[in-house]
Image: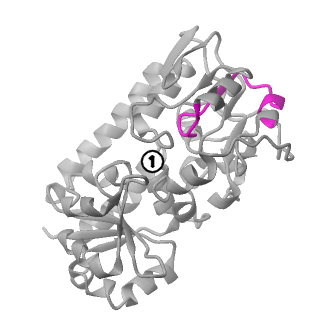
Amino acid sequence: MTTPVPSLSRRLFLGGSLSAILLGGLAACSDKKVESSESPTGPSPASNPAFPATVEHKYGTTTIKAAPQRIVVVGFTEQDALLALGVAPIATTTATWAGDDVEYNIYPWAKDKLGDAKPTVLDSTEGLQYDQIKALKPDLIIGTNAGLSKDDYTELSKIAPTIANSGTYDSDWYEPWDTQTEMIGEAVGKVPEAKQLIADLNQRFADAQADHPKFQGVTAAFVQAPYTDGSVIAWPAGLSSDFLTDLGFVIPKSLDKFVDEQVAQAEIPAEDTKVLNDAKVLVWGNEGAEDEADIRADKVLSQLDAMKAGRVVFTGDTVTSAIYFGSILSIPYVLDALIPKLDEVVPA
């Protein structure tokens, strides 16, 4: 049974749109109290096999002269890659609207990697907290999933060497897990370890496909619990549905006509939900038992082919959050939880 966590799934990663709307236009610099400034005592700081190190990103190239000891994360998921590499940040970042009462902003799938470290949690609800970041005396700032503008990057770089997103994906707010892991590995001098982590997770997907050949070519859709007006969010092929396609499933192309390019998600009105019949399997990103009961009882959704045939998986809040987190640590957590459930509902 998964441990309930705040509804990051609905409030933080709803297509990346909410974060972009609330943070993208804000650059406020307030002086809110920092929760903790203790240096981490868990995983040791990065070792020094390859410094100076250089990392290319959207705004150029950043050079890190020595193994960083005080790393501040200003995005939402970078801490997972650091912890997977055995490096604890001295600060993580969240926002009050994101469900930010997870201790140290470290979610269940990463908690055992934290050790005794107690990172400060920065609140970016009103924008990046430059004064607080500076007070932490970082020697590296990582913002691969922070939606950093050029001005943000320039200001942060005045404090410490800063890594922005790669610029190779169509969103500044979300970096693919493998790209993010590799970039962070470069920054902390752990390139071989990062590449091994990436290879291991890719192998995990390959093994899952080999073990479950019946997944191949089956249409599936990852859908978000409906709004009060009965509309449904579904995810076209891309970051939020990669966990399905990497297992061999196929996302119906019929969803594409409902995609809002600004948020990269399909917003399906109640009267058009029959398009979900193009998916043989539905994976619902729900928040709990009440949410699931509402969906099952809905007079429209309950009549979808997959619902009537029992070809449906409800993820629950923690796994939904892990899907949207899309990190080197959260994805294995998703696979552990969902592969057995998918195996049960996909016909032989």
Decide which of 345, 162 is in the foreground and name it: 162
Decide which of 147, 87 is in the foreground and name it: 147
State the count of labels. 1
Q: Residue at x 39, y 28 (%)?
A: 196
Q: Is residue 311 magenta?
A: no
Q: SS at mark 1?
A: loop
Vertically, is 247 above or below 2? above
Residue 190 visible (yes or no): no
Vertically, is 344 above or below 18? below
Q: Magenta span: helix, strand or loop, mainly?
A: loop
Residue 267 visible (yes or no): yes
Q: How many residues crowd mark 1 within 10 Å: few (<14), some (14–19), many (20+)?
A: many
Amino acid type of disc 1? Answer: Gly
* Residue 195 drawn at (x, y percent): 40, 26
Q: Toward which corner of the image does residue 175 lie, by quadrant?
A: top left
* Residue 292 drawn at (x, y percent): 44, 80
* Residue 39 drawn at (x, y percent): 78, 32
**Residue range of the region highlighted in magenta in the rendering:** 132-149
Decide which of 196, 23 is in the foreground and name it: 23
Q: Residue at x 36, y 39 (%)?
A: 201
Vertically, is 94 above or below 27? below
Q: Residue at x 15, y 55 (%)?
A: 216
Quarter occupied by the C terminus: bottom left
Decide which of 232, 242 is in the foreground and name it: 232
Q: Toward which corner of the image does residue 163 lie, by quadrant?
A: top right
Residue corresponding to mark 1: 326
Vertically, is 42 above or below 99? above
